[in-house]
Amino acid sequence: MKNDKITLAHGSGGKLTHDLVKQLFLPRFNNKALSQLGDSAILDIHGMRIAFTTDSFVVKPLFFPGGDIGTLAVNGTINDIAVVGAEPMFLSAGFIIEEGFELSLLEKVVNSMKEAAALASVEIVTGDTKVVERGSVDGLYINTCGIGVVNDEINLSISAIEPGDKIIISGTIGDHGMAVLSERESLGFTPSIKSDCSPLSSMIKKLLASGVHIKFMRDPTRGGLATTLNEIVNAQKYGIVFEEHTIPINDGVRALCEILGYDPLYIANEGKVVIVVSSCDADKVCGILKEDILGKDAAIVGEVVPEPVGKVCLKTVIGGTRVIDMLVGDQLPRIC
C-alpha cells in the first residue's frame, strides 16, 4: 500500500490485489464469512448453508475465440460457486453500457448469457441496467452475483490440507488469457487458441458425489496456476512442490507464450479447477475428471510438503528447483 494511486497491477489477482484486499478492504469489512477469502462466502441462513459470490467483467475485446463477455460473466460466477462445493442456482446480472453501444452487440451478449445459464441449469433472476456517457466505459461492463446451496456433508477448507495431499489441475493452463490476448492484438496465430470458458459445476458435482476425500478447490483465474498455489500456502504450515513436466499446456499456448515472453503459470484460466485431494484418492479423482470433456487433460501436478513452509517450488524439466512467487505485476490486463 505504498503507492498512492491504483495501477492496473492492482487488478491482476496477484500480490498487489491481495495487498489491497488484506490492507484496505478486509480490515474495514471484516467478518467471519469474508475473512475466509474464498471464491464464495459460505453463509448459514436459518440452518441452510448458502454460497454467495459476486464478480465484475471488463474483458477487452468483448468477443474472443471460445466465448464473449456474456459467457464469461455467467460461467465465471458459476465456477466461483461450484469450487466451494455448492450447487449453483441463481444469478443476477448488472449491465453498465456506454452511450452509443450497438444494440445488436448487446443482444448477442445477452443471448450468450441465456445459453450459458441454460447449459448450467441456473436462472438469471434479477438485474440492473445503467447507461453512462460516451467514453466513460469501454463499451460494456457486466457485474454478476451468484447463489448456490452447499450440501451439509461438504466442508472444503484450506485448513484441512496436510502434507502428503496431492495437487490436481483439471486441464491445460493459460488457454483463456492467450485467446483474449491473441484476439486483442490481432495476432492471427495459427492454430487459433480458444478460451476454456466453461461451467465446471456439472463435473464438480460428479466428483463430490463419488465420495473422494477432496480437501479444497479453487479456479485459477487471474494470476493463473502459480498465484492460486501461492494463495493455498499463504500463512500455512506447509508448502507445495510441483513438477514442470506434469503440467498440461496446449501446444499453441506454449508456443505463443515463448514468442511473447509470458509464463503460462501466471496466465488466466476460465474453465479449470485446482483440486487438493488426499493422496489415496488422487488417481480416482483424475479418472473421474478424465471421463468429462472438460477434464480430459487432468493431471496430478504436485504435492503438499512439510518444507519449505509457505513456499511454492517448481521442479524444472532440466532438474533444477525454483521458487514460484505470486504474480507481482500484471502480465495481461482486462482478460476477465
Image (cartoon, rainbow, N blue to C red):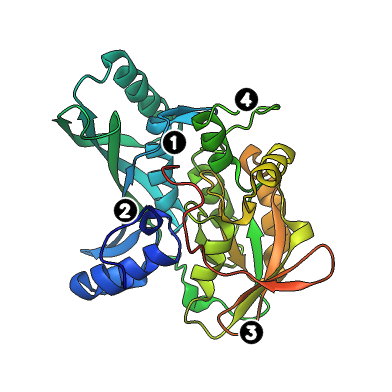
Discs 1/2, front: 2
Per the model, the C-alpha gap separating discs 3 and 1 is: 40 Å
Q: Earlier in the sequence, mark 4 or mark 1?
A: 1
Q: Earlier in the sequence, mark 3 or mark 4?
A: 4
Discs 3/1, front: 3
Disc 2 residue crowd, few under 14, some 14–19, many 20+, Cα 10 Å: many
Going by the numbered disc 2, the residue's amino acid type is Thr
Q: Earlier in the sequence, mark 2 or mark 3?
A: 2
Q: Position of residue 87 (x, y in %)?
A: 41, 49
Per the model, the C-alpha gap separating discs 1 and 2 is: 16 Å
Disc 1 residue crowd, few under 14, some 14–19, many 20+, Cα 10 Å: some
Q: Residue 32 lies in what quarter of the image? A: bottom left
Discs 2/3, front: 3
Q: Do the residues under discs 2 and 3 have CB atoms within 8 angstroms? A: no
Discs 3/4, front: 4
Instruction: Return the residue at label 1.
Output: 120
Q: Position of residue 51 (x, y in %)?
A: 33, 57
Instruction: Return the residue at label 4.
Output: 188
Instruction: Return the residue at label 2.
Output: 53
Q: Earlier in the sequence, mark 3 or mark 1?
A: 1
Taking the spot 59% from the left edge, 85% from the top edge, the residue there is 309
Taking the spot 79% from the left edge, 58% from the top edge, the residue there is 245
Per the model, the C-alpha gap separating discs 2 and 3 is: 33 Å
Instruction: Return the residue at label 3.
Output: 308
> Looking at the figure, which quarter contains the C terminus?
top left
Position of residue 36 relative to residue 283, above or below, is: below
